[in-house]
Image: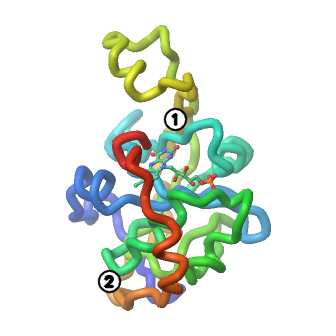
Amino acid sequence: MKKFKEIKPTEITDNVFKLLDKDWMLVTAGTLEDYNTMTASWGHMGILWNLPVAIAYIRPQRHTYGFANRYGDYTLSFFTEAYRSALQFCGTRSGRDCDKAAETGLTAIQTQRGNVIFQEARLVLECRKIYEDNLKKKNFLLPEVAKKNYPKNDFHRFYMGEIVRKRERYFNQDLHQPLQVDPSLVSSYEIPEIFPGDA
Ligand SMILES: Cc1cc2nc3c(=O)[nH]c(=O)nc-3n(C[C@H](O)[C@H](O)[C@H](O)COP(=O)(O)O)c2cc1C
């Protein structure tokens, strides 16, 4: 834990568009005894209600969905390119069927708030949920966007969370060592063509 240091939201120097669209993140909810994590690339970071917030979108069929609904917080973990295969794994396999940390070698650790983050992450945001709701078909002003992204009507639920300003926000510049992921696992979870265009 001591390898992380707390930073203020204004000290995040990453380009948010790259961070989400290209780097991806792990959205995690729950405690060490009861958590799930999944890869996500859709979201926002910004200011709302005069607070620094991060917003994540989770489809109802994800195993992570139940955890995000049950728990008051969620965390967003960002990694260097060295962990791409781990993120591919967490974005194509469900926590219903496997232990993602065990399979990828990622180390889940608990924060003081009781949330789960990953030791190997280079940037972690801990978010306290303030508002959540489902996207609704009837509210799309451009119906073609809904049609294209939700052919199965599996509209995302979105979670707006305050990026909490305590010691729980960590930044790690030192842990850039590649993970030793079993190559046989990597080849078996090619990203389906629908990702990330259909997150
Ligand atoms: C690059 C990438 C981005 C993704 N973004 C999202 C997203 O923003 N929201 C979402 O619901 N699923 C997204 N997914 C899909 C989930 O990560 C995937 O379905 C995962 O297996 C769900 O795991 P779970 O069932 O353990 O929750 C993404 C997948 C990838 C590979």
Q: Whole-percent x and y of residue 28?
A: 58, 59
The 10 Å Cα crowd at callout 2, few under 14, some 14 to 19, many 20 or more, is: few
Figure colour scheme: rainbow
- Relative placement, left or right, of 87 versus 65 is left
Q: Whole-percent x and y of residue 170?
A: 44, 73
- Out of 28 and 5, give the one closest to the viewer: 28
Examine the rendered structure and indicate whether residue 53 appears above or below residue 85: above
Judged by depth in the image, the label closer to the viewer, 2 or 1, is 1
Choose the circle earlier in sequence order: 2 or 1.
1
Examine the rendered structure and indicate whether residue 107 appears above or below residue 145: below
The residue under label 1 is 158
- Out of 108 and 3, give the one closest to the viewer: 108
- Out of 3 and 64, give the one closest to the viewer: 64
Q: Whole-percent x and y of residue 163?
A: 46, 53
Element type at mark 2:
loop
The residue under label 2 is 173
Q: Amino acid at mark 2?
A: Gln
Residue at 72% across, 70% down: 32
The 10 Å Cα crowd at callout 1, few under 14, some 14 to 19, many 20 or more, is: some
- Out of 66 and 84, give the one closest to the viewer: 84
Q: Amino acid at mark 1?
A: Phe
Residue at 38% across, 24% down: 148
Q: Is residue 126 visible?
A: no
- Relative placement, left or right, of 166 versus 123 is right
Specify the quadrant that holds the C terminus.
top left
Element type at mark 1:
strand
